[in-house]
Each structure stands twice: as structure tokens, then as C-alpha cells.
Amino acid sequence: MSALKRLLILLFAMTLGLGHADVPKLFSEQSFTSITLATAVNHYVLLGKDEAVKELEDLSDAEAAETEKNRGFNSRGFSINERISWVCRILFEPKSDARQPYLRPPKFGKLNLPVKFMPIEDWPLFPVVLSGSTYFVMSESYSDDNHVPEEPKHYIEYCRDNGVFRTTLIKLTRAQILKDADALHKSAPWQAIRWEDDDGSGYPMGDQWTWGFIQKQAMAPAK
């Protein structure tokens, strides 16, 4: 399928709320779980590196076109580009011979997390985290940090050029997800987080809110 045809299909899907069968539910529905995220990643693993990059770039183009059409208004309630970055964090792993042992997160703005107390050594996939066999997202919805945000396609290209594409599928069970969520909450990196900002101001309900966000992702339907 040509890039133009794929883009037209995705644009059409956008007008229907991204209801096209080829688009993972992570990009068509506001609510998501760890299963939703894993299914999206597996979709792109099966496509292979080149096709996966093409489809993710086309999704980003589709969102840009919709944003321009709606004069910057997002009626969907979530950012497709942000979710593309989650998938990239899992799809691409650092090269073994790289000078930097970690791929950086996207520069989209600021999340409601105390990043000062979340070093990359402990949170290498930030804002995604792997606990056991399950991937969770720590926070969603970037806010403006008074900097021009990175172009989503630039981040996709960064991951493609600096990472190794994943070839293994994510396999999960409901019991495993619940176990992994509990292990994350009890982990040393989580317990080491101080829920305050750079200036010392606190994050009211920070731990409770973030843990609640993780718990929602762990509520995968029983199979």
C-alpha cells in the first residue's frame, strides 16, 4: 500500500473516530489498559520495522491534519502523538554498542510527575514503565513547559535511527498484569519517588492519583 493511500485511509478513519479495523484501539478509544497497549505494540511488531514506522508517521500526519482542520481543537480527549511515543518507547530498544544506554523520552512538554526524583536509571522507558511482563504508563497529557514541543515524526525518526526494533510479542494474562502492577507499586524506584516539584511544592494526591491510573490499566478483562 502506498504512503498516500495509507494516509487517505487513516484520514478517513479519523473522521469516523479512528474506527478503521487496521488502527489499534489505543489510537481510537480514550480509555486504555495494559492489554490495549500491548496489543498495539504487537500489531507493529508483526508489521516489521519499516511498515511500523510508516504507519506511525501516517497516524501522526493524520492527527496533524485533523488538528489543523479543527483549528487546534481536540475533541477526542487524548493525543494520538503522545500514544505513538508510548509505542515507540516499547518498540525500540537501545543499541548494545550505543554510547547512551537509554533512549530518551519525547520532548513534548511536562507531565504531572516529579521527574526530578525519577532518574532514567530507574525509569528507562519514562513515561512508560516495565514491571515483570507488563508495560504501564505513569502519566498522560503533557502541559506546555514554555518550550516548542518536539515534532512527533522527529521522535519516531530518533527512535528508528538510535534503537533496535523489537521482534518479540508481549504475552500477558490478567493474573500477571495484576501481579506486575502490585510489584511496581511496592518497587524500590516507586518508593524512592518524592512527590514534590523542583521548587519543593508538593503534588497533592500524587502517589494516589498515579497509582489509581496504573490500577485502571491493570483492569484487563478476563479471558
Image (spheres, rainbow, N blue to C red):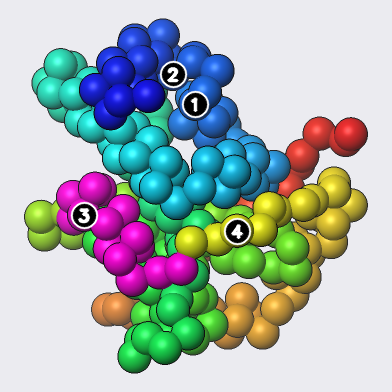
Q: Residue tagged by mark 4?
A: 167
Look at the numbered disc 4 and give the secondary structure of its residue.
loop
Q: Residues within 10 Å of mark 2 (few under 14, many from 20)?
A: many
Tell me how far mark 4 sits from mark 3, CA to CA: 22 Å
Q: Residue tagged by mark 1?
A: 23
Residue depicted at x 84% and y 61%: 179
Q: Residue tagged by mark 3?
A: 154
Q: Residue tagged by mark 2?
A: 18
Q: Residue 157's x, y, as percent?
A: 27, 57
Q: Earlier in the sequence, mark 4 or mark 2?
A: 2
Residue depicted at x 70% and y 78%: 187
Image quadrant holding the C terminus, namely top right
Q: Which residues are magenta?
A: 150-164
Above or below, comparing residue 126 to residue 12 in the picture: below
Look at the numbered disc 2 and give the secondary structure of its residue.
loop
Picture quarter containing residue 198?
bottom left
Task: Say if residue 204 shows up in the picture.
Answer: no
Q: Residue furthest front?
A: 1
The numbered dot on residue 173 is none
Question: Disc 3 marks which amino acid?
Answer: His
Based on the picture, tell me whether residue 220 belongs to the magenta stretch: no
Picture quarter containing residue 105?
bottom left
